[in-house]
Amino acid sequence: MIQAPAALPLILFFLLLAGVFIVILEIRTLAYAYRTIGISPRYVGLVLVATVLGSYINLPLYRVPVARVLPPQIIERFGRVYFVPATIEPDVTIVAINVGGALVPILVSIYLFLRTRARWRMLVATAIVVFVVHGLAQIIPGAGIAVPMLIPPLTAAGVALLVAFRHAPAVAYVAGSLGALIGADVLNLPRVAELSAPVVAIGGAGTFDGVFLTGILAGVLAAWIAPVARPRGLVSSGAGVA
């Protein structure tokens, strides 16, 4: 038998190994997802690094005076757990934007928009997702805006397949990312004071989340159903085609 003192380092080693494996698996999955929606292989590494490191960075935009700020707590809604962070400034909500969860999806969406031949269909799909997401968005005091997690990506993928089958992955990613960002986040910014949250991070996990995951899931779902979309839907060079 392995004695307890000897077993502890072994257990820690296997936990560390499992953690490394999970990280590698997540990175490979994200790399596959980005290639699927049409990101050039030479940019995938840069996008991954910006996404992973940027997820820890919130850039403050402005401050909103509030009547009160809720104390740290855990809130569950739509099967997801939201953590209310500690107060930063009394009676003030800081509105910020998350680099990995919002800025990177916006830049990727612009990149795909410029390279696709389905720009008008991309705009139509985005508008539909904005309408659906905004109708489902709910205020969670202390945490942010919540939307049923699977509805935005399923909506984006379905709409993309209907309006732009051959271009579905790229259209689904843009419609999902920008649709969630605008529908849940931007259109609800006037209601920030109702949240009583210490920080409202657009695209940040636990506050305005789902922008990044919605785009990735929508793009991959569309690609699985319409695998011919990526090679034919995007221009081979970096120049855009109207």
Image: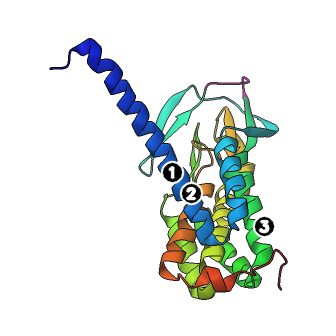
Magenta residue check for 5: no
Sequence-first disc among 2 and 3: 2
Is disc 3 placed on a helix, strand or loop? helix
Main secondary structure type of the part rendered in magenta: loop
Mark seen at residue 26: 1
Mark seen at residue 110: 3
**In the image, what residue type sits under mark 2?**
Leu
**In the image, what residue type sits under mark 3?**
Ile
Say which quarter of the image contains residue 169: bottom right
Is disc 2 placed on a helix, strand or loop? helix
Q: Residues within 10 Å of mark 3 (few under 14, many from 20)?
A: few
**Residue at the outermost top position:** 5
Looking at the image, residue 170 lies above or below residue 26? below
The answer to whether 106 appears left or right of 69 in the picture is right
Nearest to the eye among marks 2 and 3: give it: 2
Q: Residue at x 50, y 44 (%)?
A: 23
Q: Which residues are magenta?
A: 86-91
**In the image, what residue type sits under mark 1?**
Glu
Looking at the image, residue 1 lies above or below residue 122? above
Q: Position of residue 137 (x, y in %)?
A: 58, 57
Sequence-first disc among 1 and 3: 1
Say which quarter of the image contains residue 10: top left
Q: Position of residue 215 (x, y in %)?
A: 61, 63
Q: In this figure, which residue is indicated by the disc labeled 2?
A: 30
Query: Number of numbered discs present?
Result: 3
- The quadrant of the image that shows the C terminus is bottom right
- Calculate the distance from the C-alpha at mark 1 to the C-alpha at mark 2: 6 Å
Q: Position of residue 64 (x, y in %)?
A: 78, 37
